[in-house]
Image (spheres, coloured by chain):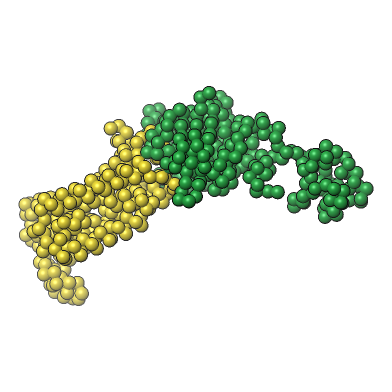
Amino acid sequence: MIFAIETNSLSKSFGPVHAVNSVDLRVGQGEIYGFLGLNGAGKTTTIRALLGMIRPSAGSVKVLEQAVGPYGRGPWRRVGHLVERPVAYPELTVWENLEISRRLQGIPNKTATSRVIEQLGLASYADRKAGALSTGNLQRLGLARALLHEPELLILDEPANGLDPAGVVEIRELLASLAHQKGVTVFMSSHILTEVDRLATRIGIIHQGRLIEELEATRLEEIRAQRLEIKAHNLATAQSILTQAGYAVKMNTDTLILNEGRAIQAPDEVATLLVNAGVPPTRLAVEQEDLEQYFLRLTGEIL
Amino acid sequence: MKTFFTALWVEMLKALRSKMVLATAAGFMILPLAGGLFMLILKDPEQARAMGIINAKAQITAMTADWPSFLEMMAMGIGGMGEILFAFIAAWIFGREFSDHTVKEWLALPARREIIVSAKFVVIAIWTLALTLMVFLVGMGVGSAIGIPGGSFNLAWTTFWTVMLTVLLINMLMPFAAFFASLGHGYLLPLAWTILALGLADLVSILGWGDWFPWGVPVLVSGMVKPNADHLGVHSYLMVLLTCIIGLAITFAWWRSADQTR
């Protein structure tokens, strides 16, 4: 298989801090890879190493089958990127910011700038100075810059940052169409896990510098834990009754959560128990955890 | 070569669109305007006496209101002020990429980083040269408008080349300012370095070794530190050249291999 991104035992330390620890990534061409992690987990450091912005302490990085060096060497004509928050020269207009990128990318097609301006919905801001843009439009400018040269690989750090809900959907659809119609590989980190859940074909989870989980999105459906969620007018009493009946119950704000198999397989028994005790549930449902809950459970950030 | 000219166009556009061009031009224009005012006061002693403190300073410098004094003052000003102002320009050109966080946009590009860094140095040279020419021409205009005596083409020509040599030497010291802007991810470190270097240049010049200290050489050439000017020789220019080479080498090496975490 040809990999768009391949790292072998990629490690990066800053003094005593191991920001990235022996990460082996394999991202196939045409994949949409969601890269998840808590703040400080090592996402951005990994992305910077992929882009040759930092020198790995150990291991190697290949992007589009080309070794990435720490001195600007790499297949950058074929890679679009957005690292952390988008930036632009504030005194230059949107058009000028993109035009300098077009020229430095060596793109001969002069219409490329207008194309991405249209594509990212920046037409009405083209003559506006970047310093006067909202965070969302600055994000669009960053994405436009990443797409300027019609790259084969997009490496995006939080691409939906600062966008309004409509913008989030728009960017999701844009990335999906690039991947599905043009075969563009997308490697994206995001803290909006529902977006990753909807878009990614494969997901990697990095925690404390280590890649602790990597799985297909379809597989994720299978392994997400189920749980019984209960709401009632008197949650404390309901919890007490269920605990006395031998269930392990967790309270999460306004919901009781039962993770045991017997509760999930026979929710009617739980309901009967509560009704007979005079605390009828107002809601009782078997739910599958979403990516966010799965992620938090995996990283140990939630009980 | 095409990539270099593209990078140069980009750097020029960034500089021209900024307010820094006007700010540095306004700052440097103090030289001919203040010099002209000084000449005007010296030309009319009655008015000079009425001005109090300015008259006292005029007597201390023992200058006369003529072209040789005016041009000498201009050359000295360009030498002294140029070292600070040009370092500020270099610090801004390199340091702004960090303060605006735009540096990451030109790290993963098909254009080699060395080319972009080179383009930045060329913009520094063009910018500082343009400022100097502007100040020199305005100075000539101010001097003519005041009507000070003693002018000649030869005097202007000689001063012009002294100024050009001074500016060239100052530019050769700019790689160190660029390096410190890169290393320090901003403006503070290069400016602190420049002030330190100028302080050391003063000290070394007083001790009589200014001709050996690279940051002392431009001010000696400009005539700012007269007693040691006679000591200037090939060794002085070689010291500046060596500093330039070392500055370029460490700046390019830094851009090639340093981690870019901003």
Quadrant assignment, res B70: bottom left
Query: In x, y percent, where is residue A35?
Result: 57, 38
Q: Relative to the observer, which residue lies in front, B208 or A280? A: B208
Q: Give the residue furthest to the right.
A: A276
User: Looking at the picture, does residue A283 appear above or below residue A121?
Assistant: below
Query: In x, y percent, where is residue A58?
Result: 45, 40
Query: In x, y percent, where is residue B220?
Result: 15, 58
Residue drawn at 46 percent across, 37 percent down: A59
Q: Is residue B46 left or right of residue A169?
A: left
Q: Relative to the observer, which residue lies in front, B144 or A116? A: A116
Query: In x, y percent, where is residue A294?
Result: 67, 41
Residue drawn at 16 percent across, 68 percent down: B41
User: Looking at the picture, does residue B148 appear above or below residue A181?
Assistant: below
Q: Is residue A174 left or right of residue B184?
A: right
Residue drawn at 77 percent across, 51 percent down: A251
Report whether residue A268 is seen.
yes
- The chain coloured yellow in the image: B
| Chain A palette colour | green
Report whether residue B139 is seen.
no
Q: Relative to the observer, which residue lies in front, B170 or A11? A: A11
Q: Is residue B86 left or right of residue A5?
A: left
User: Looking at the picture, does residue B36 appear above or below residue A30?
Assistant: below
Residue drawn at 88 percent across, 40 percent down: A268
Count of numbered tags: 0
